[in-house]
Image (cartoon, rainbow, N blue to C red):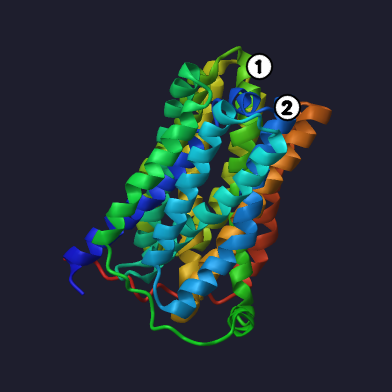
């Protein structure tokens, strides 16, 4: 396997991850206008359930796609199916209001189906990055920078196009997922040889690696904070500082830009110094920075705080994903990464539900304190576990020539 082909596949798979996240995040800055155009009668609550519907499907279906790809010994066809199905869901939502008298309950049902397909493209593209040589931190850094760039681009882009037409982001999302399918022809399917173990046997194999609970826990709370900003953060910035969707997209981009640009070097750093310091120390500082965003009095200080949140998030994210790869067996990576994405999707759901509930009941400051505090708490609880567990070194890390 030549370094050139490995680099080509890494870039192509990262591009798939980038497009999936860009399609997802482009909806967020104009979410209130979007759900109104789709027949919702409220803003915050309807926006919350619109996001929850997709991530509920992520939770249910991520492991099914992971098991299917592990058993088939192939991943590319499942990614293509997921991208096509996700595009269909987005485009169907875009055309419905002009074609029929749609009820919001029907919108949520389509949103669930769209999420069930989209998670295949996202989760299995990351799993294929796990299959590559060259260093788990480097490969997960590539995934992380794709996630960060997708979200960094999606936030300002979504804000601008939502100002043109609230349904326009759906057309863009569907077109992006369709465009990514031909890219998969460039990728060699390097999944491990298929095995015929039942899903129950695979799960039992993962259960013999309880240390996977560490990256899963951090993945859960990290995505919780992302879900919080995607919903509550949007309403907070708009209501507190009087800005519109376009300006909100820029503020979110101040987090996602450093989060994206620093993912790859931070992933390489975790290959060299280990996972513990980036995950534990980074999470404690990350939680504190989240609280800072909700306490500063001016938009300028909030923007500066969002940059800090992005830098610290970049320290944590690739090391956490790389730890999943360190701990999982070669023939269990699909399900192991699916488990990580399930934990992350549950985190998103919790971020929507917890953040939305606390913000509507007790106010935005309380919501920032709760979410930032959870990030600090999980890191503090995990310290003795990291010290007690003998974490494996990344033996696959070899500098490419």
| Residue 63 lies in quadrant | bottom right
Determine the secondary structure under disc 2: helix
- Farthest front residue in view: 100
Q: Nearer the viewer, residue 237 or 29?
A: 29
Image point 66% across, 17% down: which residue? Answer: 239
Residue 259 can be seen in this image: no
Image point 65% across, 24% down: which residue? Answer: 36
Q: CA distance from mark 1 to mark 2?
A: 9 Å
Q: Earlier in the sequence, mark 1 or mark 2?
A: 1
Q: Position of residue 329 (x, y in %)?
A: 48, 80
The answer to whether residue 311 is above or below residue 64 is above
Determine the secondary structure under disc 1: helix
Q: Quadrant of the C terminus?
A: bottom left
Q: Position of residue 260 (x, y in %)?
A: 40, 42
Whether label 1 touches label 2, CB < 8 Å: yes
- Farthest top residue in view: 242
Q: Position of residue 274 (x, y in %)?
A: 45, 65
What label sits on residue 240 in the rendered view? 1
- Farthest right residue in view: 361
31 left or right of 332 in image: right
Residue tagged by mark 2?
364
The answer to whether residue 227 is above or below residue 346 is above
Q: Quadrant of the N terminus?
A: bottom left
Q: Dot 2, how many residues are within 10 Å of its Cα: few (below 14), some (14-19), or many (20+)? A: many
Residue 21 can be seen in this image: yes
| Residue 213 lies in quadrant | bottom right
What label sits on residue 107 in the rendered view? none
Image point 56% across, 59% down: which residue? Answer: 341
Q: Dot 1, how many residues are within 10 Å of its Cα: few (below 14), some (14-19), or many (20+)? A: few
Q: Nearer the viewer, residue 2 or 73?
A: 73
203 left or right of 249 in image: right
């Amino acid at each position: 396997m030549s370094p050139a082909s490995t680099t080509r596949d890494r870039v192509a798979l990262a591009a798939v991850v980038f497009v999936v996240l860009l399609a997802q995040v482009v909806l967020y800055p104009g979410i209130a206008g979007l759900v109104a155009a789709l027949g919702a009668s409220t803003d915050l609550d309807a926006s919350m359930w619109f996001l929850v519907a997709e991530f509920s499907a992520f939770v249910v279906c991520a492991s099914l796609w992971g098991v299917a790809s592990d058993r088939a010994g192939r991943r590319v066809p499942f990614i293509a199916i997921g991208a096509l199905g996700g595009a269909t869901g987005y485009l169907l939502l875009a055309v419905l209001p002009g074609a029929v008298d749609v009820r919001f309950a029907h919108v949520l049902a389509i949103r669930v189906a769209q999420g069930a397909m989209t998670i295949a493209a996202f989760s299995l593209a990351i799993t294929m990055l796990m299959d590559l040589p060259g260093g788990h931190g480097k490969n997960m850094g590539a995934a992380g920078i794709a996630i960060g760039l997708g979200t960094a681009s999606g936030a300002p882009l979504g804000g601008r196009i939502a100002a043109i037409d609230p349904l326009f982001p759906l057309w863009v999302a569907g077109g992006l997922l369709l465009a990514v399918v031909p890219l998969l022809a460039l990728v060699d399917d390097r999944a491990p040889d298929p095995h015929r173990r039942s899903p129950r046997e695979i799960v039992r194999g993962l259960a013999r690696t309880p240390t996977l609970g560490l990256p899963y826990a951090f993945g859960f709370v990290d995505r919780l904070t992302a879900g919080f900003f995607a919903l509550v953060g949007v309403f907070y910035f708009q209501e507190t500082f009087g800005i519109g969707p376009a300006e909100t997209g820029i503020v979110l981009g101040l987090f996602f830009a450093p989060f994206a640009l620093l993912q790859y070097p931070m992933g390489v750093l975790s290959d060299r110094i280990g996972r513990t310091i980036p995950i534990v120390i980074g999470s404690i500082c990350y939680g504190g920075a989240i609280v800072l965003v909700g306490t500063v009095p001016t938009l300028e200080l909030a923007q500066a705080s969002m940059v800090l949140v992005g830098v610290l998030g970049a320290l944590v994210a690739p090391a956490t994903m790389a730890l999943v790869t360190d701990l999982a067996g070669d023939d269990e990576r699909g399900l192991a990464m699916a488990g990580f994405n399930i934990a992350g999707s549950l985190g998103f759901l919790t971020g929507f539900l917890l953040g939305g509930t606390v913000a509507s009941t007790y106010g935005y400051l309380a919501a920032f304190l709760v979410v930032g505090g959870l990030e600090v708490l999980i890191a503090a609880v995990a310290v003795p576990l990291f010290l007690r567990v003998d974490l494996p070194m990344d033996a696959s890390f070899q500098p490419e020539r």
